[in-house]
Image (tube, rainbow, N blue to C red):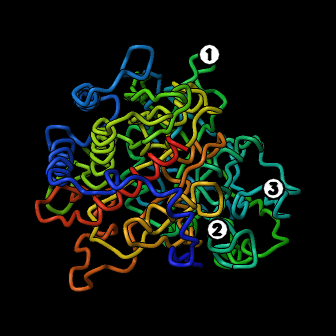
Amino acid sequence: MKRWFTAFLPGLLALTLSPSASAQAVRPDDETLLRDWIRTVSSDDFGGRKPMTEYEDRTVAYLSGELEKLGLQPAFGGSWYQPFQIISTTCRPQKDRIPLKGRRRSELRFPDDLTVWTARATDRVTLRDAEFVFCGFGINAPEYGWNDYEGVDVRGKIVVAMVNDPGFYDASLFRGRNMTYYGRWVYKFEEAIRQGAAGCLVLHDTDAAGYGWHVCMNGHLTDNLALYDAATRNAGELALKGWLRDEGGRKIFDAAGRDFEAALDAAKRPGFRAIPLGVKTDAVLDVSWQVKETRNVAGILPGTDLRDEVVVMSAHWDHLGIGTPDETGDAIYNGAADNGTGIASVLLAARRFRELPLPPRRSILFFFPSSEESGLFGSQYYCEHPAVPMERTAADINFESVGPAELTEDVVILGGGESVLDRYFVAAAAAQGRYIFFDDDNSDGWFYRSDHYNFVKKGVPALVVENGLHPVRPDRPNRYPMESWYHKPCDEYRDDWDLEGTLANVNLMLSVALSVANK
């Protein structure tokens, strides 16, 4: 890991890149507005903001109304909305079992051992004599000299792949703890499709994934979302996708008569070769599905002489809706921190931009994508059908779970060293009397887990901003660390939240956006 302290930067850099004082200053009513917006969008009235429900209608209508009140213009040809089709599927193995036929007979139990879904528009998925093949990390990465599929044919078979990449276990491999895109579960499915597999189960591990089994289960038991291709009915998708719990993986290896731990250890070393397990299944999954329309929301503030170019400020509006109750019986996943704080931050940024005495040179797009929680689908669709072409998009400043946060001396950045945005963040932090900590431990793959990454894949600069590690007042630590509320019904707004650091970070990102818009 490395730190870049702003004190070592030439004064000229800070002078030329730091934004105006008005962009950095916290206004007296900023916190009131931020709290009001968070409280509203995370209230029970919004039902957890699940796409393709009545609560989507309420959410997008509220957002477009707020953008209009702020004096912005509709971003999509006179409309606040960018509609697109998405398929929602719920899968359940018949009798909640997936049989295993190998040296020993066993079964995977749903949802204790695995969660499964499909993106195909079909009423039933049937797999006959489909063999399980352990393909290590499920990675084909020529630039790292690594191919878990070398010498094995997985066509029509079910790939079992470990989450993350080899660097998580050996710092000399890939990028060490700085996870590559190859470590993401989404990539595992993409590569399995390219290899012709019928299905892919990603083997969960809490440390390597960065979250517990409850996230896998709560996120995929019902209403799994995917972009929908009406021409093919998504026939090119895997018949079966899923997360496999550690206990489920052991069952498959036990049925094969193989040592589970030895196979995982071998997969972490160069030279590993995939292991056909000789375990087959006759699995039948009942599928309920429907194709509906969901909407991205955006407003735009036109610029001046560079108005045909744009800086995007984004925050996904969706969350998990109403789902599995917690121990208190609460079943509404309100999503106050994730991502009510992001929504409120973009609205606050829009208000602050509207208050500037002169518009910025480049236009500013205030963008609320749908369906981030289920796979970044709203931002994916936008980046394929942008309001302003990608080659004229200067940056994406994405607000993802930015609070509640205490004020810290530092600001953590993921994705540093990858774009020109670094220097803008360093200068903006210096203007606040803070410094940037460039964190190269992306072991949980956070850099790939929000909407900014779809912009990155199109060549648009973007970074991930997180709250710092060193509180200005150590006697006032953050009482709501992320692990206590992430993707749980208890992620609700509280009046006793400390938002001092949240507001500082919002102003930091606002300052960067203003600098990029004017340079």
Answer whether labels 3 and 2 touch (C-beta < 8 Å): no
| Observer able to see residue 76 | yes
Residue found at x 21% / y 48%: 38
Residue 63: x and y, percent?
Answer: 27, 31
Q: Residue 126 appears at what percent x and percent y? A: 59, 35
Amino acid type at circle 1 is Ala
The one nearer the camera, 238 or 411, is 411
In the rendered picture of this protein, how many numbered marks are placed on residues? 3
Residue at image x 30%, y 79%?
Answer: 472
The residue under label 3 is 149
Return the x and y of residue 128 as percentages of the image width and height.
Answer: 66, 40
- Give the label, 2 or 1, closer to the camera: 1
- Residue at 11% of width from left, 60% of height from top? 495
Q: Secondary structure at mark 3?
A: loop
Instruction: Classify residue 398 as left or right of residue 66.
Output: right
Toward the viewer: 230 or 65? 65
The circle on residue 231 is 1
The x, y position of residue 89, in whole percent, is: 44, 33
Q: CA distance from mark 2 to mark 1?
A: 39 Å
Kind of element beneath mark 2: helix
- Measured in 3D between alpha carbons, the distance from the residue under mark 1 to the one under mark 3, in whole angstroms, is 30 Å
Q: Which residue is mark 2?
A: 253
Q: Residue at x 60, y 48 (%)?
A: 461
Circle 1 sits in a helix, a strand or a loop, which is it?
Answer: loop
In the picture, measured across the screen, residue 334 lies left or right of residue 281, that is left
In terms of sequence position, does the residue under pointer 2 or pointer 1 come before the other? 1
* Residue extending farthest left: 495
* Image position of 327 (left or right of 4): left
Left or right: residue 319 compared with residue 515? left
Image quadrant containing the N terminus? bottom right
Q: Along the polypeptide, which appears first: circle 3 or circle 2?
A: 3
Give neighbour class at mark 1: few <14, some 14-19, many 20+ (Cα, 10 Å). few
